[in-house]
Image (spheres, rainbow, N blue to C red):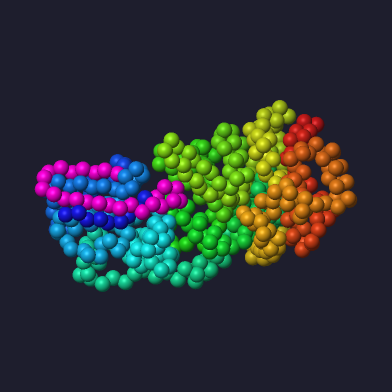
Amino acid sequence: MLVKTYSAAVNGLDVTTVTVEVNIVPGVMYRMTGLGDTAVREGRDRIASALQVNGYKFPHADITINLAPADLRKEGSSFDLPLAMAILTASGAVTADTIGDYMLVGELSLDGTLQPVKGALPIAIRARAEKFKGLIVPKQNEREAAVVNNLEVYGMESITDVINLLTGREIYEPTHVDTRREFYEQQIRFDLDFADVRGQESVKRALEVAAAGGHNLIMVGPPGSGKSMMAKRLPSILPPLSLSESLETTQIHSVAGKLKRGTSLISQRPFRSPHHTISEVALVGGGINPQPGEISLAHNGVLFADELPEFNKQTLEVLRQPLEDHKITISRSKYTVEFPCSFMFIASMNPCPCGYYNDPTHKCCCTPGQIQRYMSKISGPLLDRIDIQCEITPVPFKDISKAQPGEPSAAIRERVIKARDIQTARYKDFKGIHCNAQMTERMIHQFAEPDEASINLLRTAMEKFSLSARAYNRILKVARTIADLDGSERVEVQHISEAIGYRNLDRGDWAERRMY
């Protein structure tokens, strides 16, 4: 008897419907075709044990299985459930006339319970697009998949529950998630707040400007000056995710298997902080079976690189293209996978190897040559992609003890949202442009053209501080954001002046100030 069930294969963020065909005739052979990997082929033993424990016999017959399309590689253990149901139906052990109306995914334990799988959300989106009546997933994946409307999603505990559902022995209610209510309820809940930060007003201002324009930022300061503390609070002042951004972000985390169990949608912008020993593949994605890297997991959020010079220099260099293109393409001989990676890059570092240059409470013991070698770990092209560069000095204890609690994140976030609303209206006719940091050179001339006084100030600054020509556009982008925070239609001298102050680490000025 020939039976067909339906499942899905996930490659990157693309999902392909897979038809699981099982034909059983008298004989003793078990054959599988369709480019299933080791995990798929090993499913035979898991299925046999699961059926035996639940009172069914694995058929002693000639079983031929095909996973169509046969030329598409299938990976993972999520094909266990559709294979098991196809074998049971083809052998006549169960009668399930509606089996073709559902898409099935799930890994089987030896006792028949269903284990969670990766990519349940994009699979659910595909199931709805293919007009399946419903999707059957493991219980741990039900809320994630139920985000998709107009699709019946059933979270099952074991293969026995799936059999009872498809044969009509029991009635199960599909899972319902009030997506909008849960999404908006969780958007304003933050464990960290800028009210905890005492002092450092200039750095908090720089972070506000970065959040308002989507700019990359680096902080340089001695140990204990608050770099990591403030970076971790950045998501609390970023504009809230839209539903479309949340759906896209959740899909990436779902495919990577990083979504917390019981989560429906990611409602807050992600904050990723990889250790400096991270490899290139782990950072940008890839591997034998390509998976999203940290830059894709930070999509629509923040990627924080603490102690930037401690990262492998070659690893840092792979960030250059994603920072410009906002996507990463992973190519293999037989296929290509593309992941989005539009993120804010925030970095922190010490000013010198010992860490105490410019620290009023400690004496620096580094020579100019040591400082120069330390800084050379960060290439000029990467540094040029960081719009805002600011230095931090520690707040003395007497000032910390006297300082009042800082401005709360909610107040800062309100100003950031207003500035982003201005940018959204400004770039509504430009596809793929949502904030000032994404402006092209032509758009800079259109929306951030400085007046005569500002041009004179820029000329003076570039000559005095040895600013690179690449810094020119960065200064104008940041100045445009500062003007938006002020509610100004034009970029004025004071905006240019503040933006110039955020280019502290440009090569010429940085080296000169440390050598002399």
> For the magenta stretch, what is the residue range?
10-34
Compared to residue 373, the image places residue 282 above or below, namely below
Residue 221 position, x and y percent, is 68, 43
Residue 50 position, x and y percent, is 20, 53
Compared to residue 363, the image places residue 121 above or below, namely below
Q: Residue furthest top?
A: 369
Which quarter of the image is occupied by the N terminus? Answer: bottom left
Residue 172 lies in quadrant: bottom left
How many dots with numbers?
0
Residue at the image position 60 percent from the left and 45 percent from the top:
325
Does residue 402 appear left or right of residue 134 in this picture? right
Does residue 94 appear left or right of residue 19 in this picture? left
Does residue 142 appear left or right of residue 215 in this picture? left
Residue at the image position 75 percent from the left and 45 percent from the top:
473
Is residue 89 shown to the viewer in this render? yes
Q: Depth check: 241 or 354 in front?
A: 241
Q: Depth check: 57 or 63 in front?
A: 63
Residue at the image position 23 percent from the left and 47 percent from the top:
65
